[in-house]
Image: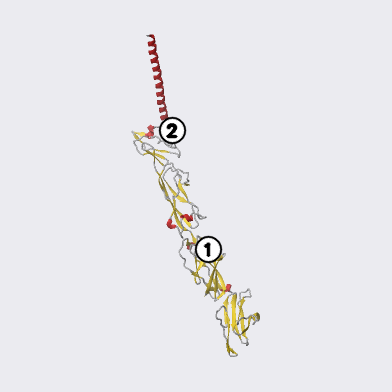
Amino acid sequence: MLRKEHYSNGKSIIESIEAVSKKLGDTKSYIADRKKITVTDDYLSKVTVKNGSNTVLTKTEDDITKGSVSFVIERTTETNDDIVYEITAEDKSGNQKVTTLTLKNPVLDVDAKNLDFGSGNSALTYGYEEVEAQAVSLINKANNQPVAADSITLEGANGEAEYFEVAEGTKIRPKQGLHAGTYTEAVRIAYNGDAESEVTCKCSVTIKKANMLVRYTGQKDVGYHTLPDLKGTIEYTATDFKNGDTKDVFVKDADFVAPKLYYMDENQNSQEFTSDKRAMETMQLIPDGGSSHDYEFSYAAGELEVKHHVLRDGYVIEGKKVKAINEDLDLNSLIDDGDDNNTANNNTEDSSNNTTDGNTENTNVTLNDKSYFFNLNTYIINYNIFLYIFLYQIFSCIHFQIYQNHFLFVLMSTAGNC
């Protein structure tokens, strides 16, 4: 505040020129495009503002209320040069006080550093703890010296900030609980004691997805050639959920894609295990192909354990193989267990090929997905033998009946003759 004390009619008169309630000397400079000025004095009668020899503003008693008047001065040139104003306050006795005010180009002289709270390899992870706040930083470009920031205002795309908050004073930090993504908002910084001396910077942060282990829980004693019930067999690790998420919530997210189960076929190609795939053999299943907005999935396999399909006489089906588990048994003695869906294909030529010195070879017979009976030739031979025995019995009965009828006829004829 500039003061000059003098006397008029025995009273002390204090002249003052204020700039947003900050004291001014005879000369003052501001890094600003505009400046609000207030001049006060009990006997104030006139205020004049000049730029060089040009008078840019005049305030008279018609503009003065209760010894006070306010106005705004601005930079009136598009150049980067300093703009110098002389403000002259005059009381009713003709006493004057002159203050020189210089406005410097804020774009040229002040640099506001953008604030990065995490990006690239240093990005935050979804579910992060409270982030340490950062203070805004202003640098005078002319001398590379710091400039004090008085206050800050955050602005979002729609006005009010959504993703960042003022922690304290001029310090900023991201809000808690942000979802995966990149966020940027503007910071308006007032400096050098004037709320209208402003510069803008940006604050940004990138949130990467949190890791989550997804696994197939595995199933035991699954019936051979059945359709396994896969419901609930894909498990999301409960301890990997963040920010209070649960499975019931995050699976309903619009970006959620459920993983599917896969197995390796005989050619080592990954194949999806669909709901219409029958359990033919014990195998490893692993989830894959899922995605979520906030989680990056990793996968763990489990075992689908198919119980042995026991046939007869010590033979079992393991996967697509029929295996003799007792070497003293002849493969040709194997008979189907009665399941109409089971048909086998035996590659042996005859029973004599399966026996060496009275011992049966441990023979594996390849099956297809729908056939579980054995050797077609053996089946036909057995069928022919059965048919032969069946026909033999029929013809024997017919022959006996003819013989029996002939014998009765002879007896009846002899009795008649008598």
Residue pushed farthest right? 54
Looking at the image, residue 50 lies above or below residue 170: below
Q: How far apart are marks 2 and 1 (CA)?
A: 71 Å
Residue 7: quarter of image: bottom right
9 shown above or below 393: below
Front-most of 361 and 382? 382
Quadrant of the snapshot with the C terminus: top left
Q: Position of residue 201 (x, y in %)?
A: 55, 69
Q: Is residue 36 left or right of residue 370?
A: right
Q: Relative to residue 42, is residue 237 drawn left or right? A: left
Please tell me which residue lies in front, 319 or 308. Answer: 308
Report the mark closest to the observer, 2 or 1. 1
Q: Quadrant of residue 314?
A: top left
Whether residue 261 can be seen here? yes
User: For the N terminus, which image quadrant?
Assistant: bottom right
Q: Is mark 1 on a helix, strand or loop?
A: strand
Percent x, y for residue 45? 63, 84
Which residue, given by chain and number where applicable, does mark 2 sit on?
376
Question: Against 202, is 7 above or below?
Answer: below
Which type of secondary structure does the marked residue at label 2 adopt?
helix
Q: Which mark is residue 183?
A: 1
Residue 101 % position (x, y):
59, 80
Front-lying residue, 121 or 45: 45
Q: Please state if 255 lies on the left or on the right of 34 as rendered.
A: left
Q: Which of marks 2 and 1 is nearer the N terminus?
A: 1
Q: Where is residue 391 in the image (x, y as percent from the top left)?
A: 42, 24
**Residue at horizontal 59 percent and vertical 79 percent from the top:** 38
The colour scheme used to paint the residues is secondary structure
- Label 2 close to label 1 by CB (< 8 Å): no
Going by the numbered disc 1, the residue's amino acid type is Tyr
Q: Which of 224 and 301 is in front in this view?
A: 224
Q: Which residue is drawn at 38% across and 9% down?
A: 417
